Amino acid sequence: MVMALLWLLDAFGIEGTAGLEGNGVWWRAVPGLVAAVALLLPGRPPALTWGAGAAVLASWVTTLALLTAVTPTFAGWGLLETLCLLLLLVRAAKDIPRPWPAATLSAALGVAVIAAPMRLDEGGVVFSFLLTFPTGGAVGLGCYLRSLDERRRRAVADVRQSERLELARELHDFVAHHVTGIVVQAQAARAIREIAPEQVDPLLRSIEQAGSETLQSMRKLVRVLREDDARAVRPGDLFAELGELVAAFAERDAPATLQVAAEARQARPAPEVETSVRNVVREGLTNVRRHASGSPSVSVRVGLSGSDAGAGTRRLRVEVHNAPSPRQTAPNAEPLGGRGGLGLVGLTERTEAVGGTLHASRAEDGGWRLTAEFPLRGAVTGSPA
């Protein structure tokens, strides 16, 4: 709307000088139109770079053409051009990833903005001086937004690295647990090979399957480091720990319930999946505590989703749902954790690392729902887990 209004003002100004200079004066509107098109291009860095470069070129060609004209000239400086060049300056300083191209293009845009009023016969120097202030403000704004983006990228990278380290530590403990079971079963096979040879083959199959699961967990440790100062977590205690989390939340914060489907209790998720399930529930309850305090009810549900055709097609589904809080009855309230928060970034990283998916959305009743699905493996006969 503002751009359209400025374009109309420029058009009226050009029309007022057309009678003095002829129809050729209309080419002075080209820089403003080029800058407007460049500003409306998609925000990807290549398109921004080429579009801003074209706007700078059009502006400079027009300025030099009017400054070197032999015949007297009239107003050739457009408000639309100035606005679009300033906005392009902000975007160039903010969005072009490489520092030197960003600095070069920003400098060219800033000089083009300041030089454009020099096309005027009178008052050009004054207007150029006045435009140094919004130009400096545009550069400062772009650099500030760029620093915020860089700070957020570093924060996201730190969260992801922290989650990878946490996952590596827990997977190490799980692998050690599986290896202990393999050793125990191997010792049992040696002990009974003379007195009950028919039981050796089932033990060997269990050892083989447990070893395969251990290798699968070990593959998740690639390029991940382990910290040494955390406690070990024993697999198999998933639902007991979920019960403790929900009970503690209900005691201190709001009424909360845990519902575990019977088929989910019979499932055998991988150890790293169990840890991710705990983290999803913990993060969901933490978000309710922080951002939806006063919620009348919170429910945690664990079940299976997918086809009944086999274990390979079933997925473990975990859902944390809170009823709308009296403080969050507005229809446009933000999701738990706020928009752009880092809590769900790390949780998504952990969930995807074990082959799962995570989704947060508004529920039908106006509350919020955090849903995660994880792959399942078949139960292992004789597995220590």
Image: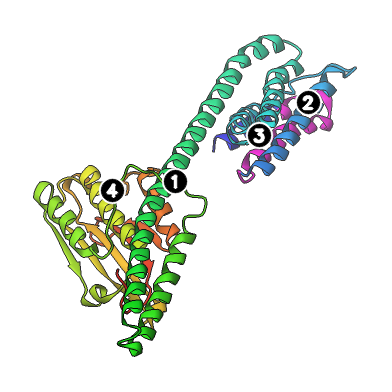
Q: Mark 3 highlights which residue?
A: 98
Q: Is residue 295 left or right of residue 287?
A: left
How many angstroms separate mark 3 from mark 4 (CA)? 43 Å
Label 3 sits on a secondary structure element that is loop
Magenta span: 14-43
Question: How far across and down, in percent of the image, does residue 43 sit?
Answer: 60, 43
Q: Is residue 230 left or right of residue 328?
A: right
Circle 3 residues within 10 Å: few <14, some 14–19, many ≥20? few
Label ID, residue 160: 1
Label 4 sits on a secondary structure element that is loop
> From where the camera sits, is residue 335 visible?
yes
Say what amino acid the circle numbered 4 marks. Answer: Arg
Q: Earlier in the sequence, mark 3 or mark 1?
A: 3
Label 1 sits on a secondary structure element that is helix
Q: Mark 2 highlights which residue?
A: 60
How many angstroms separate mark 2 from mark 4 (CA)? 65 Å
Label ID, residue 231: 4
Say what amino acid the circle numbered 3 marks. Answer: Arg
Q: Earlier in the sequence, mark 1 or mark 4?
A: 1
Q: Earlier in the sequence, mark 2 or mark 3?
A: 2
Residue 117, placed above or below residue 331: above
How many angstroms separate mark 1 from mark 4 (CA)? 20 Å
